[in-house]
Image: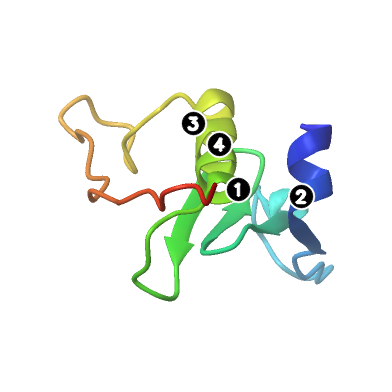
Amino acid sequence: MRELAASSRSLKRIGSRDEVELTLYRLQRDEVIVKADILIAVISQYRAILYQKELKSFTAKDVSLRKWIFDMYDKLTHMPFLWGGDSEPKYEVEEEKT
């Protein structure tokens, strides 16, 4: 994780904490946003959302972030149902420059 943190930019986003709000998850909204070259991950206690703003090939840093997320969050579905399935789109990896 240290190598990933050293090669990526991150930002902690803290959810609102309104004392009047009636919810069980009020204190569990904190997220960390990690940005590689193309890939961006929004990470919370329970899920990670991966997205990219530009349709480009992934770099080695992007692949490293993606691998770390999939190692930490082993569920591939966005829903707790068994029939959710894997909905990840295909992606290309940029060739390393020699």
Q: Position of residue 85 (x, y in %)?
A: 19, 33
Label 4 Cα crowd, 10 Å radius (few <14 / some 14-19 / many 20+): some
Q: Residue at x 72, y 48 (%)?
A: 28
Lower position in the chain sequence, tag 3 or tag 2: 2
Q: Which residue is mark 4?
A: 69
Q: CA distance from mark 2 to mark 4?
A: 15 Å
* Residue 56 sits above or below residue 36 on the image: below
Q: Secondary structure at mark 1?
A: helix
Which mark's residue is nearer the viewer, 3 or 2?
2
Q: In the image, which is nearer the foreground, mark 3 or mark 1? A: 1
For marks 2 and 1, the one nearer the N-term is 2
Question: Residue 70 shows which numbered tag?
Answer: 3
Looking at the rendered image, the disc whose residue lies closer to the viewer, 2 or 4, is 2
Residue at the limit of the structure toward the bottom, as seen here: 54
Q: Residue at x 66, y 50 (%)?
A: 25
Q: CA gap, disc 4 to disc 3? A: 4 Å
Q: Are marks 4 and 3 in contact (CB under 8 Å)?
A: yes
Q: Are marks 2 and 4 in contact (CB under 8 Å)?
A: no
Other residues around mark 2 within 10 Å, as few (<14) / some (14–19) / many (≥20): some
**Residue under numbered circle 2:** 7
Q: Amino acid at mark 1?
A: Lys
